[in-house]
């Protein structure tokens, strides 16, 4: 088991594991036709467990799979955070300004431009892509920052600030760019609590209790296993995500390509530009990575 964990933590093999996980997910989705199910929102699935009304079904299981996978990804990254690190991250005005500028003054309009170029205005795909461009990511960017040895504490602060602002601004942008579009901002709040709040509290407590019991050096040994757990969570989440639309991916590959083109351009251009801006402003590698991912990643949670 330990050897398997060591292989998973080998970044040279990670692309292979990612591709295999995607293939497994697509296969599961194709076999069970999962896109035909009405999926249960993760919050509702968890609430049914608390209230004792949970019923085992494929939609409920997949909803919990997303929660479990993202928690396994986020939790190890949070064990790296010290309370003092969060305080220092708050005092990073340049980094905060860069992320907010690109997330709310550049990204929505750049994605709208790409959607207009690649998709038919007014179509469901066009609307979905524009909405996707409005919402900064609230979970995965922390994991990507962690795996890239970036400033995880800064990433958490940026995610929290992005989450608050998008709850206020997404309805405004959606109405401005798309017209009469219904959007439930409380879904964002629930996602922040579920995918950021719980892992953060668990990670801080784990670090505090672990260092208290084993010391800083002793806790590092525990951390090596936890870090691998993050990779396991990533691969598991990929399986679940691709299972959700596996049958559609195989039945309508043209749609995937149609959406992949503008999204690839968006992510590539945004990350390179933001990273270069950070470099020009004298950000450290750790801060530039955190800023780059936070200003590029979009919210699928």
Image (cartoon, rainbow, N blue to C red):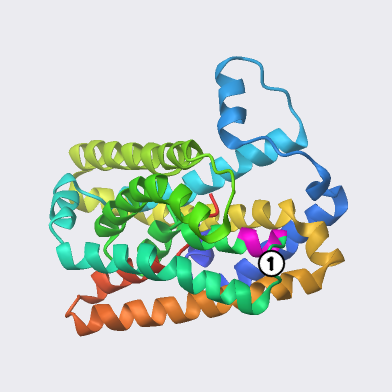
**In the shown orientation, is residue 223 left or right of residue 267?**
left
User: Alpha-carbon neighbours of circle 1 within 10 Å: few (<14), some, or many (≥20)?
Assistant: some
Percent position (x, y) of residue 226?
A: 40, 51
Location of residue 103 (image quadrant): bottom left
Name the residue carrying label 1: 20
Residue 185 drawn above or below residue 291: above
For residue 43, which quarter of the picture? top right
Q: Residue at x 55, y 54 (%)?
A: 300
> Quadrant where the N terminus lies?
bottom right
Asked if one can make out residue 299 in the rendered structure from this viewpoint, the answer is no
Q: Position of residue 15 (x, y in %)?
A: 58, 74
Against 166, is 13 above or below?
A: below
Residue at (78, 64) in percent of width and height: 249
Of residues 62 and 245, the one drawn nearer to the viewer in this rendering = 245
Tell me which residue sits at (39%, 82%) in the image.
272
Camera-side residue of 103 and 293? 103
Residue numbers of the magenta segment:
124-128
Q: Is residue 176 covered in magenta? A: no
Residue at x-position 43% and y-position 68%: 107
Q: Main secondary structure of the magenta part?
A: helix
As for residue 127 lying within the magenta part, the answer is: yes
- Residue 50 image position (x, y, % from top left): 55, 19
Instruction: Give the SS element for disc 1.
Output: helix
Q: Quadrant of residue 4?
A: bottom right
Front one among 278 and 211: 278
Q: How many marks?
A: 1
176 on left or right of 32: left
The x and y percentages for residue 46 are 57, 28
**Location of residue 14 with respect to 204 vertically, above or below:** below
């Amino acid at each position: 088991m330990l050897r398997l964990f060591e292989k998973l933590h080998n970044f040279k093999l990670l692309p292979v594991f990612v591709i295999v996980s995607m293939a497994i997910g697509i296969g599961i989705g194709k076999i069970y036709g999962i896109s035909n199910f009405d999926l249960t929102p993760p919050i509702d699935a968890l609430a049914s467990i608390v209230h004792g009304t949970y019923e085992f079904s494929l939609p409920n299981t997949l909803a919990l799979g997303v929660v479990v996978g993202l928690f396994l990804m986020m939790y190890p990254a949070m064990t790296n955070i010290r309370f003092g690190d969060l305080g220092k991250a708050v005092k990073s005005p340049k980094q905060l300004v860069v992320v907010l500028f690109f997330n709310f003054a550049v990204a929505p309009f750049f994605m709208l431009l790409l959607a207009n170029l690649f998709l038919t205005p007014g179509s469901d795909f066009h609307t979905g892509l524009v909405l996707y461009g409005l919402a900064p990511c609230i979970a995965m960017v922390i994991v990507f920052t962690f795996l890239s040895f970036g400033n995880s504490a800064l990433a958490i602060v940026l995610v929290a600030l992005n989450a608050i602002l998008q709850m206020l601004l997404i309805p405004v942008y959606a109405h401005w760019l798309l017209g009469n579009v219904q959007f439930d901002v409380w879904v964002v709040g629930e996602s922040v609590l579920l995918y950021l709040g719980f892992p953060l509290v668990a990670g801080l407590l784990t670090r505090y209790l672990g260092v208290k019991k084993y010391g800083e050096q002793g806790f590092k040994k525990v951390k090596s296993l936890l870090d691998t757990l993050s990779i396991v969570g990533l691969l598991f989440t990929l399986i679940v995500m691709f299972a959700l639309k596996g049958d559609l991916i195989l039945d309508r590959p043209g749609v995937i390509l149609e959406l992949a083109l503008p999204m690839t351009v968006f992510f590539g251009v945004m990350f390179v530009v933001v990273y270069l801006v950070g470099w020009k402003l004298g950000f450290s590698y750790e801060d530039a990575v955190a800023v780059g991912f936070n200003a590029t990643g979009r919210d699928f949670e």
